[in-house]
Image (cartoon, grey):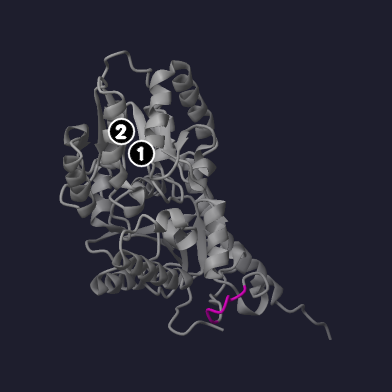
Amino acid sequence: MQNEGRAPGRLAFAVLATNMEDQFPSSGRGPAHTLRPSSPRTVEPVKVLLNTTTIRVGGALQTSSAFIIEALRNPGEIEWSFAVSAAGARELEQFGVAIPESMTVIDRPPASSLASRRKLREVEAAVQPDCVFTFSGPAYVRFRNFHVVGCSTPWVTHATWAAFRSLNSVREWTACIARTAYKRYWFRRADAWILQTEAAARGMVSRLGLPADRMTVISNTCGERYRAAQGEKPHPQPGQPIRLLCFSAPYKHKNFEVMPYVARELAARRPELDFKIIVTLPPKNRICTEMLASAERLGVANRIENLGPVPVAKGPELYQTCDISFLPTLLETFSATYPEAMAMGLPIVTTNLGFARDVCDDAAIYFEPQNAVSAVDSILRLLDDPELWKRQIARGKEVLTRFPTPQERYQQYTRFLLSFRQKAERGAAKTVAPAHTA
């Protein structure tokens, strides 16, 4: 039994309908894929097409680049091919990676480009993979082969009222709900899913109705350059300028609009304090222009400095020039900024929400969401207490050890991908009838 329009791969990556339906129910999406199993005596590399064309900005650009570097360095049992975004290709070049022949660069995002979707299907047809792995979905493509997709989209899995309250108009609400529904549709078109937290996995089951036994949870982490450049930021001396870093892409749920109010409150309570809030936004982006306009109205334009987008490879250098990692975010799955700050030895000030506590535990100072007074209270606690500053950094180093290294994370991904071949081969073995003697 094979899905209409789907082509079998060389290895048994998909579920065998006759024997595996009890392990991988179809969840109402139609019959499961049936691919021809290879002989158990023949071990061939698994052909995987890694799709990162959906990744343009943010922490996923860092983690996907680290994953590709590891795949090129240590392919193991997998024969990789790659389809990457133009931004992803530039990041790899920043790391000194030459673009191999097995990599296709697709300029426009498939979410908004039918041409890019067609190109992805052409790449799949040319590669003929056993599996397509979209690192951060949805892919917006109905691939012909078995499709594993990573999900780090919190609006889809576990958005709360705190995030929805950040939307300022009926138009924003409508657009957000429509985008989320569209993404959910495409996530359901995949065959297996990789999540970054247990909360996100529970949301995939409860909100999308997807089967838990086709999912795995693999924690996010920070790149190898952060681990190699680890340090401990000393407590600021009296009169020393303070730089609070919000290293993030321009997403609405990152809550940049609170920045001018935090700057005004901190300047009012400590007028002698020389400080700046550092952001990394595209200068012409609407979130950036509105934030800076608000800072101008509040009289704190000189307190917010926008560096523009910073390449992932330059991230450790940016942390080294700052003192506190400040994240007023209202919604995350697992922001790489948290382990990055821990590695670089910056104390963390962030929102008192479940996703942040799940990652940081007690290695952060928390404040109430969208509350500038509470945020400044937390910042001043750190600045006024050198021992608390040191404890937070030390605790961050301890929490960092819970997260996998990029190499360990790569192995977790590959084990999950390879597990489908093993399950399908076991299922195929059960279909072989015993020999009969006359």
Rate crowding at label 2 as few (under 14), some (14 to 19) or many (20 or more) other CA atoms within 10 Å: some
Identify the main secondary structure in magenta.
loop
In percent of width and height, residue 428 lies at 64, 73
Q: Quadrant of residue 421?
A: bottom right
For label 1, the SS is helix
Residue farthest toward the front in the current orientation of the protein: 268
Front one among 309 and 192: 309
Q: Could you say which disc has been placed on residue 372 in the image?
A: 1
**Badge 2 or badge 1: first in the primary sequence:** 2
| Range shown magenta | 25-30
Q: Kindly identify the residue that appears in the image at 50 percent across and 55 percent down.
A: 195
In percent of width and height, residue 383 lies at 38, 21
In percent of width and height, residue 368 lies at 45, 41
Q: Are marks 2 and 1 in contact (CB under 8 Å)?
A: yes
Query: Image check: 81 left or right of 429?
Result: left
Label 2: which residue?
Answer: 265
In percent of width and height, residue 222 lies at 42, 39
Q: Kindly identify the residue that appears in the image at 48 percent across and 30 percent down.
A: 396
